[in-house]
Amino acid sequence: MTKILRIAGFVIALVPRPVLADDGTGLYFSHLDWELACDNTLTCRAAGYQADDDERPVSVLLTRKAGARQAVTGEVRIGSEVSDLLLAQPKPLRLTMSINGRTYGAVTIDKKTLRGDLASDQVAGLVSSLSHKSNIEFAKGNTVWHLSDKGGAAVLLKMDDVQGRVGTIGALIRKGSAGEENVTAPIPAPVVVAASVATPTTGLKPLSDRESKYLRNILRRTVKEDDCPKLYDKESGESKISIQPLSGEKRLISTLCWQAAYNDGTGYWIINPSRPCDAALVTTSGTNYSKGAITAYQKGRGMADCVSIDRWTWNGKHFVHTDSLTTGMCKMVALGGAWKLPTKVSELRHENSHQQDVPSN
């Protein structure tokens, strides 16, 4: 039976595990000014921001790996609107951290990245403060950044739940007397071997009008019109179909699927010319293909202070969904996003090579 906890004035349901989705992705959860992303290894990242009516952007990121005796690490990032006068000072930019009037020392901010690491006692003070109403500030003289506490307890409680810490001595919100020997262990990132692809210089003849029409009819069987309206659109003109070699007889087919105010999506399919009716859809929201990798980069809004990124990698047979992340809430902390909050990571290895990519966590 689902257990309901009432913490700090809100209600949160602790749903039974498994927490991973069927496709191997992790979990995303948000409440008010805080959000949580736990990837498929069960590493969790909680990010908090300023309130919506606060014009001075700031964000804190708390990260914790799964497993017993794992410490929480913390970072703070201030918005790029920070005064040029502060950045022009020859001395390091050091912000005083305080919670409810109590000072927790200084945080050194890198003037290029506008980020700084939190000390262990600062992290502990912040985590403790989120279980009740708190005034959290980072200040340089009269310039103050206010971090919202709203939603923090819900997000940290969900982190505890995902990692199996509720009721243990290591829980962040709902501590108990149980040890950590039975908390959920980390899950290894899946290993994906990236296969080499044929180079475009091997060349493929452009599709004739007849071939394009034939392919469109096949592709329409694999996707709903709402997901790829351009494939069905005859009034404004059909978008061009491109074809590129993959490996063996496999080919990558692509065509524009949809366009919005500040995003667009290209559809990608794997096809074998000898069996074209078996065309396999990869995604209808791709934005780029290069050397065996399809990427989808989508803005949360036009100014691109929040984006989502997905990546699919060719393994010689099909494209594997290897990465999925967002860059956090649309809070104007930074163009391109404040953080990397993955829900899916992979360990990439390259075919016939000892080269290895670091997982995106």
Image (cartoon, rainbow, N blue to C red):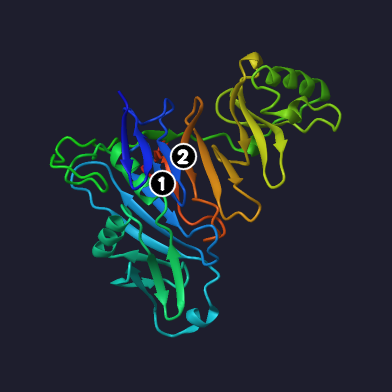
Between 71 and 17, the residue placed more toward the observer is 17
Pinpoint residue 32: horizontal percent, then vertical percent: 47, 49
The residue carrying mark 2 is 323
Is label 1 in contact with label 2 (beta carbons under 8 Å)? yes
The x and y percentages for residue 137 are 39, 68
Which quarter shows the N terminus? Answer: top left
For image coordinates 33% across by 70% down, the residue present is: 98
Kind of element beneath mark 1: loop
The answer to whether residue 234 is visible is: yes
Of residues 81 and 132, the one nearer the viewer is 132
User: Would you say 261 lies left or right of 145 here?
Assistant: right
Q: Which residue lies furthest to the right in this view?
A: 235
- The residue drawn where x is 45% and y is 80% is 142
**Relative horizontal placement of residue 293, taking residue 210 as reference (left or right):** left
- Residue 239: x and y in percent read 78, 33
Of residue 152 and residue 4, the one placed in the foreground of this image is 4
Task: Name above or below for residue 46 compared with residue 214.
Answer: below
Seen at 57% across and 34% down, the residue is 198
Which mark is drawn over residue 360? Answer: 1
> Is 32 above or below relative to 186?
below
- Residue type for callout 1: Ser
